[in-house]
């Protein structure tokens, strides 16, 4: 829904930076939580290279670093909210 909403904002010609940062921040953090839980479910085997879980965990981890780190996206979101205000729910 966030991705679709952001694509719609772009189609409307609006500045999508705040939404893009929200999508990237949310998706990469959520993926991190999901694969972390996956490793936990696999137990010790989830940490070994015998199962794909270790690869998924490692690949997911870098998503919080490239294409803007989580901290930088938080700054983009915070600056936008301070400038434009918090939207009404
Ligand atoms: C696998 C991989 C592929 C990559 N591919 C590309 C690519 O194709 N093109 C490209 O241009 N780059 C690429 N990069 C580089 C990537 O964009 C940078 O690693 C990323 O921007 C973070 O920069 P940095 O590594 O210098 O960390 P730093 O900027 O040194 O950040 C280190 C830590 O400090 C935090 N931090 C930094 N500044 C602040 C601040 N002002 N406030 C709070 N926290 C802050 C960061 O969030 C991070 O946690 C790639 C990196 C990796 C690992």
Image: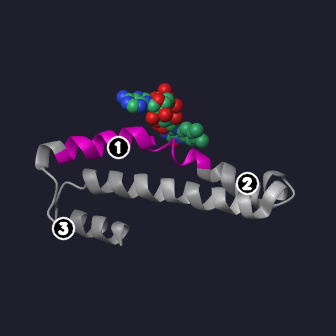
Magenta-span inclusion, residue 62: yes
Q: Secondary structure at mark 3?
A: loop
The answer to whether 30 appears left or right of 61 in the picture is left
Residue 15: x %, y % from top left? 19, 54
4 to 60, vertically: above or below: below
Q: Secondary structure at mark 2?
A: helix
Q: Which mark is residue 33?
A: none
Which quarter of the rendered picture does the N terminus lie within?
A: bottom left
Q: Which residues are magenta?
A: 61-81
Looking at the image, is mark 2 or mark 1 earlier in the sequence?
A: 2
The answer to whether 42 appears left or right of 15 in the picture is right
Q: Nearer the viewer, mark 2 or mark 3?
A: 3
Residue drawn 45% across the image and 45% down it: 67
Residue 9: x %, y % from top left? 22, 65
Residue drawn 18% across the image and 67% down it: 89
Q: Is residue 68 in view from this perspective?
A: no
> Can you tell me whether the CB of the residue at mark 1 lies under 8 Å from the nearest atom of ligand 1?
yes
Q: Secondary structure at mark 1?
A: helix
Residue carrying label 1: 74
50 to 69, vertically: above or below: below
Looking at the image, is mark 2 or mark 3 earlier in the sequence?
A: 2
Magenta-span inclusion, residue 53: no
Residue carrying label 2: 55
Residue 39: x %, y % from top left? 72, 58
Q: Nearer the viewer, mark 1 or mark 3?
A: 3
Q: Is residue 75 in view from this perspective?
A: yes
Residue carrying label 3: 89
Viewer-proximal residue, 55 or 11?
55
Residues at marks 2 and 3 touching, judged by CB atoms closer than 8 Å:
no
């Amino acid at each position: 829904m966030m991705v679709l909403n952001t694509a719609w904002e772009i189609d409307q010609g609006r500045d999508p930076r705040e939404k893009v940062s929200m999508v990237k921040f949310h998706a990469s953090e959520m993926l991190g939580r999901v694969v972390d839980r996956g490793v936990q479910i696999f137990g010790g085997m989830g940490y070994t290279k015998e199962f794909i879980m270790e690869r998924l965990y490692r690949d997911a981890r870098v998503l919080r670093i490239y294409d803007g780190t989580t901290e930088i996206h938080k700054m983009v979101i915070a600056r936008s909210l301070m400038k434009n205000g918090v939207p009404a729910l």
